[in-house]
Image (cartoon, rainbow, N blue to C red):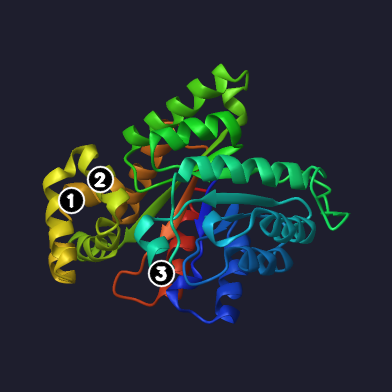
Amino acid sequence: MANLGFSLSPMSGIPYPEFFTLVRETEDAGMSGIFVPEANNDALMCCYGIAHTTKRVQIGTWIVNIYLREPTLCCAAAEMVQEASDGRFILGLGVSHRPALEARGIDMGNARDRLRRDTRVIRDTLGGKTEMFGMKFRQPKKPIPIYYAALALETSRLGGELADGLMLYLCTPERMRKSIDAAHETARKHNRKPSDIAMTVGLPVFMHNDLKRAYAAAQRGLAFYMALPFYNRLLARSGFEAAANAAMEAAKRRDMAGMAAAVTEPMADALALIGPESRCFERLEQYRKQGADLPIIVPNPVEEEYSSAVRRLLKAFAKIN
């Protein structure tokens, strides 16, 4: 059975009882892992619930924002999830985006320095080296792997030095390969085995037999990311400078239709799996050939409710998993 994860999003607005129903259905469909993004939810709390809802799948935060958590408190929550899941938990860490942090009154500073520092504190705390008021923090019975959200190559290199895996998103297979190579090169410099660093990649999926309708949904769904400065720069450097500039100008005007229109079909195809099943499966295989250890399917509705989209994609991808 090939490794294939699913991202299930509380940000979709579905009630939590329905969220956990989808969790059970994802495990029953034979998927390898369930990964939870974070924005207006607490991904660690969601993973704790998933741990009590499932028996087999890997569980991961995708990702938790390090700026919102004091690292030893993050450790306490992660240890609880690891215990509840009997060793199935992956702690995905990331730095979010400057506009999102500034809206909360948080100064990002140097994000990679902060990620390096928090990783050290988390590893020391989980290893029993940190005390508070004379008390040590609980240690997990099984080690907790730490993965990095790595949009920049510099973060991929930091992952090669310190992390157990990378969590990539919105990148072409070629860009993913560059990130993998950067992590592997750094791993060798630090006397680590490149094979010890797992490579995951999130793949937005807009599956529909009508390609035009699938493209329209993809353009609307991907437009949000074009307004985030880091994603915008990344896409500009990936060969879509004109589209990135047009989307950012539309974002400044709060013109959602203009942002969606700026997402060209070639750019959407480069970043997502779009169209009929066979077309999506072919694109997935390209990521696997370029080195993805665990592709993570990110369901996106195409003229339907979120839960319906998840169930439709579970049924489709179970055929090849």
- Residue positioned most to the right: 134
Mark 3 surroundings within 10 Å by alpha-carbon count, few (fewer than 14), some (14 through 19), many (20 or more): some
Q: Can residue 64 be seen in this view?
A: no
Residue at x 51% of width, y 57% of height? 6
The residue pinned by badge 3 equals 309
Say which residue label 1 marks. Answer: 244
User: Which amino acid is tagged 2?
Assistant: Arg
Residue behind mark 2:
233
Residue 225 lies in what quarter of the image?
bottom left
Secondary element under disc 2, as helix, strand or loop, is: helix
Q: Depth check: 151 or 319 in front?
A: 151
Residue plotted at (33% across, 35% down): 175
Going from the N terminus, do you reach mark 3 or mark 2 first? Answer: 2
Report the side of 124 relative to 226 (left or right): right
Tell me which numbered mark, 1 or 2, is placed earlier along the sequence: 2
- Pointer 3 with pointer 2, Cβ within 8 A: no
From what the image shows, is residue 308 above or below residue 152? below
**Residue that appears at 72% across and 60% down:** 81
Tag 1–tag 2 contact (CB < 8 Å): yes
